[in-house]
Image: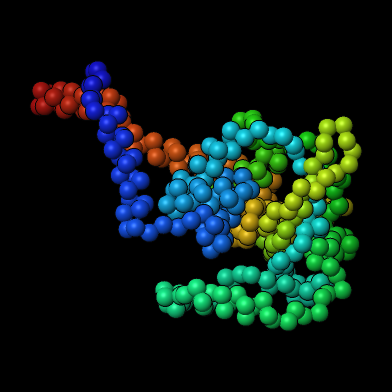
Amino acid sequence: MGYVAVTGGKEAIEASLQHLSYERVKHGKWIDVETIKATMRGFLDQVMSESSLYSENLAALAMKQSEGNVEEAVFLLRAHRSTLPRLYYSTVTDPRDMFVHRRISASFKDIPGGQILGTSHDYLHRLLDFSLVDETEEEVLQKKADFEEVEVPEESSIPLEKLPKVMDYLRAEGLINEFPVNDEEPDDVTKLSLTFPSSRSERLQILTRGQTGGVVSLGYAGLRGYGSSHPNVGEVRVGLQPIHVQLDGDDEEYYIGSIKLTEVESFIPANVSENGKEVLEFDIGYGACFGQNETKAIAMSILDHALENPENTPIHDEEFVLLHVDTIESTGFISHLKLPHYVTFQSKLEQMRKIKKESEARK
C-alpha cells in the first residue's frame, strides 16, 4: 500500500475557512464581545472554568469566534493560555473571606448569616418566556431601573465577606474530624503530565477543568449506584473571592482583584472503626470552579470523595474518571477520527478481501 497524492488540498482548506467566516455573517447580523459578556453569564462561566483561564473578555471573544461552540471556545482559550507568561502564583486564599452573592445549605434550614438565595435558575418554572423574542432596549432599561430602585433590607449581623462555614459547626461538635494544615506545594497539571497514582491537588485541578457535562454525568452515575458517595450538600456558596500575590523577596501580600467562584462542601456519611466499634462520621467532598457553576461543583464534590476512597466501581477509578472528563482530551481524540485514515482503512480492506478470496477458494 502507498499514499495517494491529493492535489488542491491547500486551496480546498482555504475555501473551507472562507465559507466558515461567511456562515457567521451571512445573515447580516453580529454580536459584539461586550454584549456576550453582558448577556451570556452562564456560558461565560462554563468556558472560563473548562479552560482554566479567568478572563471574561477573552472568554467572550472565544465564544464569538467559535459561534457558540463550547468545545471550540475552550480549545481556543486553552491554546491562548499556553502562550501566556506565568508572572506570579497567588497566595493561599480562604473562601471564608468570599464576598457572598449566594449561599444555601440543603442540610440545615437555619444557618448563621441565613440562607441567601441570590441569583439562580433553580426557582423558575422552566417555561419559555416568549416576551423575550421582541424585548426592546427600553424594556431592558426599565427592568434594570426597577430592580435597582428596590430597597435593600437590613444587613445581617454577620458581614457578607465574613460568613462562617456550615462545616465549622459540625467540626465544633466533633462530627467531622480535624486535619492538620497541609502546606505541601500543590502539583500543577498544566506544567507536568498527569501520572498515577495522582495527588488530590491534581485530581481537583482536572475536575475543575473538566467538561461540565462529563463531570456531571459521572457524578450522577455515582448517585445511581456506580459509586458509594451519596452526599448531603452542606453548603453552596457563590461570590467574589479575593486574590493576592507576593513579590519575590517580599512577605507582604498584594490584592490584585477578585474572581467569581462557586464552592461546594458535601457531607458523606461514613462508617469508621473506633475502639473496636463501628461509628458513623461525615467525610467531606469538595468542589470549586470559576464562575457560577453549581451543578458542576456539586458533581465534583461527589467525584472528589469517590477518588479519595478507591473501590471497584467506575467513579472510584482515578484513571477512568480523570482521563475522560477533560474537554480537550476527549473531544480532540474523537474529532481526530474525521482526519484522513486512508492508509489504515485500505489496509483493513485488503485483509478482508484476501480472507474472503481464501474462504471462497476453500469452498
Placement of 49 over or under 322, stated as above or below: below
Left or right position of 188 against 93? left
Q: How many marks?
A: 0
Left or right position of 112 against 261? right
Q: Residue at x 66, y 33 (%)?
A: 85
Horizontal and vertical percent position of residue 219: 58, 55
Q: Using the rendered image of the protein, determine whether residue 256 is visible from the camera's viewpoint.
A: yes
Quarter in which the C terminus is drawn:
top left
Placement of 110 over or under 295, stated as above or below: below
Horizontal and vertical percent position of residue 88: 74, 36
Horizontal and vertical percent position of residue 168: 84, 61
Q: Residue at x 30, y 44 (%)?
A: 19
Left or right position of 252 against 21? right
Quarter in which the N terminus is drawn:
top left
Which of the two residues, 146 or 362, is positioned nearer the viewer here?
146
Which of the two residues, 127 or 270, is positioned nearer the viewer here?
127
Horizontal and vertical percent position of residue 247: 82, 36
Left or right position of 223 against 344? right
Which of the two residues, 204 or 348, is positioned nearer the viewer here?
204
